[in-house]
Image: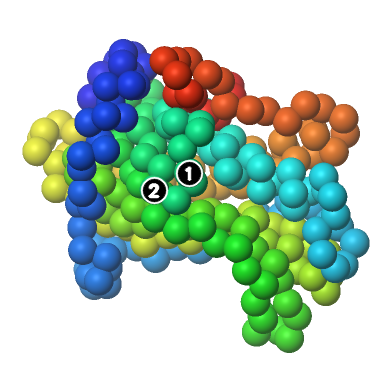
């Protein structure tokens, strides 16, 4: 916990590279575990495969770069040139004036066409991460951009399974117990609103935001404020 941005993201990324998961992925049921699925409309396209540079493709690029996160709640440091799967991300959770470093690792990329229960088909692209040692939470989040190929509807879908981790600092533990879940659901809602706004701005002729390089090398911070 600190009151300013991380003083040395390069060192922080090196440290979390040695960390393992802080939970057993096979044990995510029972008391204390939350299972979430949040959908947010991003726009409409013509039915069929994604339109070049349309809402789906633009949203995929911004999801890849973690530009959907609300900067007043969460930011991330990572190596821009690292492969997506296996990418370590040093998240910086923000609550009022406090900053919390949180390590996660991208474990999978989603790129598929699948059947829906209503008989339509959808194309999905996205990725997921799992929490590492010393994170305040335990679990996995999946971020997907989904286009219904029959209707043209484009959505941002966040799927998560999470639980509070063991927190040694009693003050932080108390604060997380009171505000953790509220902040988590607020992050979901804010991410959907932000991505929808950015997609609309790009469609109107605005520039697509990109993570800001802060060095050394290819280290970036996202989202763009």
**In the picture shown, does residue 82 fall above or below 124?**
above
**In the picture shown, does residue 10 fall above or below 198?**
above
Q: Which residue is mark 1?
A: 83
Q: Count every numbered label the image shows and give the total.
A: 2
Which residue is found at the position 20% from the left and 39% from the top? 18
> In the image, is 155 to the left or to the right of 213?
right
Which residue is found at the position 35% from the left and 33% from the top? 90
Q: Position of residue 209 (x, y in %)?
A: 67, 28
Q: Along the line of sight, which residue is nearer the eye, 136 or 102?
A: 102
| Residue 88 at least partly seen | yes
| Residue 39 at least partly seen | no
Q: Quadrant of residue 50?
A: bottom right
Quarter in which the C terminus is drawn: top right
Q: Which residue is mark 2?
A: 86
Q: Determine whether label 2 and label 1 are within 8 Å by CB.
A: yes
Q: Quadrant of residue 163?
A: bottom left
Find numbered disc 1 in the image and state the secondary structure of the residue it sits on: loop
Find numbered disc 2 in the image and state the secondary structure of the residue it sits on: loop
């Amino acid at each position: 916990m600190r009151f300013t941005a991380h003083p040395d993201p390069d060192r922080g990324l090196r440290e979390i590279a040695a960390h393992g998961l802080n939970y057993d992925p096979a044990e995510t049921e029972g008391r204390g575990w939350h299972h979430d699925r949040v959908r947010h409309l991003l726009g409409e396209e013509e039915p069929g495969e994604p339109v070049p540079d349309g809402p789906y493709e633009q949203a995929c690029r911004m999801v890849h770069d973690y530009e959907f996160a609300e900067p007043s709640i969460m930011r991330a440091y990572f190596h821009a040139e690292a492969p997506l799967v296996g990418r370590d991300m040093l998240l910086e959770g923000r609550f009022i004036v406090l900053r919390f470093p949180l390590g996660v690792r991208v474990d999978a990329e989603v790129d598929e066409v699948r059947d829906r229960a209503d008989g339509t088909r959808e194309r999905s692209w996205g990725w997921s991460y799992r929490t590492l040692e010393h994170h305040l939470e335990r679990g996995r989040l999946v971020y997907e951009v989904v286009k219904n190929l029959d209707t043209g509807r484009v959505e941002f879908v966040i799927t998560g399974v999470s639980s509070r981790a063991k927190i040694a600092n009693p003050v932080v533990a108390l604060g997380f117990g009171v505000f953790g879940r509220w902040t988590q659901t607020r992050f979901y809602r804010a991410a959907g609103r932000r991505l929808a706004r950015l997609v609309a701005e790009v469609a109107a002729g605005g520039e697509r935001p990109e993570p800001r390089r802060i060095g050394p090398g290819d280290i970036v911070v996202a989202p763009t404020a």
